Amino acid sequence: MGMLLKIFFSIFAITSIEARPISYSGSSTLMSMSDNMKDSIYYHYSPTYKYSIGIESVNEKFFDKDFIYLRLTYLLNRKNTKHSQRNLYFQSAIAADNLNNNFYGIHGDWETRRFFSGFGYKKIINNSRNHAEQYYQLGIAPYIGEYGDFHTWIMLKSKKNSLIGNWKTYPVFKFFKGDFLIEIGYDSDIDWDIHMMYRF
Amino acid sequence: MKKIYFLTVLVMSGFAWTSQDHSKSHSIEMHAHSHEGHIHEELVDGRKLEVDPDRFDNFIEGQTNSQVAVISVNGMVCDFCARGIERTFKKDKSVQKIDVDLSRGKVLVMYTQSAKVDFEDIKQKILSNGQNATDLQIISI
């Protein structure tokens, strides 16, 4: 399985020739995320389509600690075609009160109007215990909505946190309309995995 | 189960690997149709225009003395990602209305008749949202 992951990761790293914006130039995004390991609220602003800067408040449930991170996300790579888009991002952050607490990583995706695939890897450095998070995600749109419609994705997500150690695979539903997006996943072991986003 | 899952991942990665960039194609297909009272001579330039006739008719309904920019856009695969295009063009005071056709990868922008429609400016606006404008045709109505 480790070899398969490496192959998958390598394919994405190679094929992600160009990237797309985190958000469009001059826009703001508010995100919240909650799973078995942490709760987070994250605001970022995109001066251009190539990068965003933001601030994130994180409650690490495993350590029972709170962090305030200053974050930078940069578009490493993009490939736009008529029917698809591929992206590769670099993300990094430092804690506002202690530079020794930080994280960095990459995440990427490829999508058409029907299919979605994505991955992410993040290394977290902190005084408590260094650890890593990684995930892979596949999705299909059960119907193709038009601009302004209510959109739905059915997905399968696999993720691992090195603090826990094993991979968990579970279904995720993604819905969005207009500037609001919500992603909801559930697994009996890790409980709810919820991600919300609003752009303005 | 895990083997099936990762086999699927590899297949989808293959799709990504083989997907071709059509950004250099400027040959687009026109669905022949007519609108009473509307001028379509601008389309007769050797190229054909791929727009949904019904969608186009709805877009221009009741409008006169305007010009419609039909912009071909690469990478516009998601409603959530295309939102910025509408917002960016709406800041332009010469823009009267906008329509995004995700299925065909087109953005229709209605300008006032006196506006100067500049493809380089349009490219920049699309790029600021992270996509690429690959073609432009202007239709006077």
Image (tube, coloured by chain):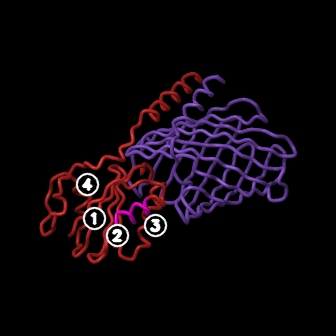
Q: Same chain for the residues at labels 2 and 1, yes or no?
A: yes
Q: Tag 2, which secondary structure?
A: strand
- Residues tagged 2 and 1 counted as in contact (Cβ below 8 A): yes
Tell me which corner region of the image, top left, top right, bottom left or bottom right, holds residue A48: bottom right
Dominant secondary structure (helix, strand or loop) of the stretch shown in magenta: helix
First-in-chain label (4 vs 3): 4
Q: Amino acid at mark 4?
A: Val
| Mark 2 and mark 4: Cα distance apart in space | 16 Å
Q: Amino acid at mark 1?
A: Phe
Q: Same chain for the residues at labels 2 and 4, yes or no?
A: yes
In the image, residue A91 above or below residue A24: above
| Mark 4 and mark 3: Cα distance apart in space | 22 Å
Apparent colour of chain B: red
Near mark 4 (Cα within 10 A), the count class, few <14, some 14-19 or many ≥20, is many
Q: Is residue B123 within the magenta segment? A: yes
Residue on which the image places disc 2: B97
The percent coordinates of residue A115 (x first, y second) are: 45, 39
Residue plotted at (71% across, 53% down): A40
Q: Is residue A122 within the magenta segment? A: no
